[in-house]
Every structure is written in C-alpha cells, then in structure tokens.
Amino acid sequence: RRNARGPLPPGPPGLPLLGNALQVPLEHPWLTFTRWAQQYGDVMHVNVMGRSFVILSSLKAIDDLLEKRGAIYSDRPITPMAGELAGFGQYIPMLPYGPRHREGRKLILGAVNPRNLPYLQEVQEEMITLFIARLAEDPSNFALHIRFLIGSTVVRITHGVTVDQYDDPIIEAMENVMDTFTKLSAPGAYLVDSFSSLMHIPDWLPGAGFKKVAKAAQAETLRIEDKLCNIVKEQVACGTAPPSFIGDLLQNHPDSTPEEEEVYKKIGLISYTVSAIESFLILIAQNPDIQRKVQAEIDVVTGRTRPPTASDRSDLPYLDAVLKEVLRHMPAGPLSLPHKVRQDDHYAGYLIPAGATVLPNTWAIMRDPTLYPNPEVVDPERYLHNSDKNINPDPRSFAFGYGRRVCPGQTLAERTLYLTAANILASFDVSDAVSLDGSKPKWGGRIISKPLPFNCTIKPRTKAL
Ligand code: HEM
C-alpha cells in the first residue's frame, strides 16, 4: 500500500500479481464493495491484477472528488476488451473527457431540451398507449412488452424509426449490444484489461478467443448502427424524416464530416430504463398497500375516465415518491459508470493515483442508514413531508451518476418511467412477483443491475379504463 507518491487508501489485502482479482465477484460487485467499505472506509483501494480501483462509498467523498474536482475526475477508463477491441470506446458513455465527448453530450442535451418537450411527450404517450393495449392482450409476456416499449421508444426518439413488430431485428440487436457491452466491460472479466499487451497477440494463438468475441461484438454493433443511420439518411434525403435526434442533426449539419457522423450514430444505444420498470413491477407486486395508494391517487386525478398523461405528473406526488423509492431501493446503476482520474491527486491523506478507475458506490449511498433510515424498507412516505434536507435526500441526485458525466438522458428516462408506471397502475393490479424457480425475485448484473427473469400476475382492475 506504500507508494513513493503517498500512501494508497486502505483496502483488502490481495495476492501477489492477482491483487484482489479473485475476491471481486463478477456478479453484483457492489455488494462486496459495500461490505468492504464498512471495514476499510469510504475511500478504498482495490487492486485487480495491477489496475487500481478507488471505490467511493460516501456522499462526501463522491461530492468532493467527482463533483468539486470534476476537471480531473471525468475521464473514463479505457478497457482494452470493451473499449478498444470491441469498439465501445467510441460511444459517448465511454469517450475520454474532451471535445468529442462534450460535443456528444451537447447533442443529446439539445435534443431533450424543453423546446422539444411537446414532441417527445407525444411520442412517449403514443408508445405507452400501445404498450398498455399489448399488456392487456397478453399480460404474461410483460417482460417482452417492456423491452419492446423501451427499444421502440428509443429508436423512434433517436432515429425517428418506427418499429411495430416484436421480432424486428433492430430491437433484438439493440438489446444484444447492451448485453454484450455490460459483459465485456465488467471489471476483471477479461485478462486483457489488466495486461493490455495481450491485445496484440495473434488471433490464432490458443487463449486468443477473446479477440474473436470482441470482433463479433464490434461487427454486430456497427451493423445495427449503420442500418439505423442509413434509414434516417434516406428519410432526410427524401424529406420524409420525422423529428428525431439523429434526423435533426443530419438535417441541421448537412456537411458533417464522417467523424461527426460517428458521434451522431453513437448516442442512442444506452438504456437502463428496462431495469427500472421491472424493478417497479416487483416493488408494487410486493407492496399491495403502496399499490392501492398510487391507484387511489391516480383515480382522483383522472376520474377513471382517461389514462394518466405527462401533464398529470405534478398532481401525483405519491407516485413520484414511489418512483424515487424504486431508484433508491434497486438502483439500475449501483456503481454508476466508472470514472477515471487524469492525474495524481491527494484526498483525506491518501494518494489517488493517476489513471485509477474511480467507482462511485451508489449502492452504498442508497443503503446508508444515516441518509435513509431503515434503508431495506420500501417506504415512499420517507420523501413526503420531509423537512430535514440531510435525511432521505432525493435519490435521483445519485441514481443518474455524478459530475460532468451525469446521465444526459435523465429527464427522458424519468418521464418514461413515470408514464409507464402511472398507466400500468391506472389499468392493472400487479401481484405475485416470483423468480422462475418460485423463490423471491433476485437482481443480477455486472454494471447494470436488473431483475433476473421473473413472473408476476397482471390483471385488469375491476372497472378498467
Ligand atoms: C432509468 C433510466 C436511466 C438511468 C438510471 C441512467 C443512469 C445513468 C448513469 C448512472 C450514468 C453514468 C453517469 C456517470 O458516469 O457518473 C449514465 C450515463 C449516461 N446515460 Fe443514462 N440512465 C438512464 C437512462 C438513459 C437514457 C434514456 C439515455 C438516452 C438518452 C441515457 C443516456 C446516457 C448517456 C449518453 C450516458 C453517458 C454520459 C457521459 O458519459 O457523459 N441514459 N446514465
């Protein structure tokens, strides 16, 4: 733990060469980090085969470093496997902090700004209406309907492309891309991430199978991006392009360079939203009292004569509190996304070495009993009538990440979550959420936490809309 430039933060002892690699599980590492934080503190150092990870497990440490010192803590670690070999390093979430990244964020923030709100709301409401109709027809396939809702909304908003069929290869390919990204980028999943020289070994050498995996992932990603982008280009050329992030960008920048186009292509493929909606379903199935209360609140606002809309949101404070509790109790990004520190820094007497991967442990924040009393208990009331700013802070301030890399899709995501939740509860009762083996629902994942496949009963409310 000694270093000529200063002592590293405390952390669990590891093995020579491997460091803590064998102790960090691939599945939900945030649970292990949270346990370790109780022993080693809120700024902890973990060594995975020579790579430094600094885990921040308190709001103060996250705020001091990722927010206040954002100028040096806003880079992303380049992981050879996901970033370079599979090409994900070109996506906005993985781009190094710099002009290209800033440009990418500007594009997204411009597209979701209040000027475009009426159009975005209209599209989202239209998609939700279709979703509710499909759910009513075939409730047991809710997971498929949710995926289709999110996938089709994302391509409609980002590319202006309307997808009506469940087996449309675009939706499936988008999901595969997300899955592959999370598998390939998990810390410690691939040896090449610790020994980057392995990137250069010939493809035919035994043990180079990871290169084949990366190549296949890259080819699939490029195929789907190009396919979507070409559809938009054709629509723009014919003057038939509906409003969309990418259609608008191509129209407003007809002379864009291939490099600029690359940024346009890479904005649309990230979504944590499916996970948040599924967590919502489980939460309300497990808490019938909460469910009844939300339904009663919606009924007063809509009179049960119409579906809830985006403009009802401010009149539904209890539902708002339930959604905060979904994001707190089962955050879809329990370690946010990894940040990287650009230069040596010193904090609380310790060295944070240049190039270290800095992981904000959002899970530990959301389960901190000094912030959220009885953190395991699902209790939307904790946000209502809350006069002490230091207790039960709004979890949306943490669920969407930190500092200069905070999620630019937050308003869009929150509106989708609200519309889906409100419309589900206006029309259905949800109960009996169980894993496929009949046990309590479980969550899994390496970077994005999501419910493992589960069943639940979704029945029309007696006097459904
Ligand atoms: C419930 C849904 C969502 C959650 C919980 C979520 C959460 C997050 C988190 C935790 C980060 C990492 C921030 C950091 O590095 O500190 C992030 C980044 C990002 N999110 Fe979201 N997100 C959601 C939906 C969306 C949507 C719908 C979009 C599409 C516009 C989106 C686009 C992005 C992008 C582009 C980044 C990378 C930002 C950067 O690196 O500068 N997200 N999100």
Image: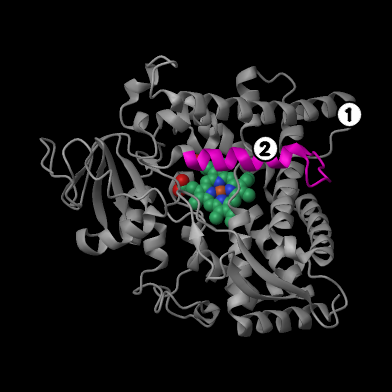
Residue 154 drawn above or below residue 281: above
Query: Is residue 267 in view?
Result: yes
Tell me what residue is drawn at x 50 percent, y 61 percent. Answer: 443
Image quadrant containing the C terminus: bottom right
Q: Amino acid at mark 2?
A: Ala
- The secondary structure type at the circle numbered 1 is loop
Tell me what residue is drawn at x 32 percent, y 38 percent. Answer: 341
Front residue of 417 and 212: 212
Residue 10 drawn at (x, y percent): 18, 52
Label 2 CA crowd tier, 10 Å (few <14, some 14–19, many 20+): some
Residue 457 drawn at (x, y percent): 70, 72
Q: Is residue 79 left or right of residue 378?
A: left
**Magenta range:** 158-183
* Residue 181 magenta: yes
Q: Which mark is residue 209?
A: none
Query: Mark 1 = which residue?
Result: 239
Q: Is residue 366 left or right of residue 6?
A: right
Say whether mark 2 is within 8 Å of ligand 1.
no
Labels 2 and 1: the sequence-earlier one:
2
Quarter holding residue 284: bottom right
Mark nearer the viewer, 2 or 1: 2
Image quadrant containing the N terminus: top left
Residue 448 drawn above or below residue 243: below
Residue 146 drawn at (x, y percent): 70, 57
Query: Mark 2 = which residue?
Result: 173
Q: Amino acid at mark 1?
A: Gly
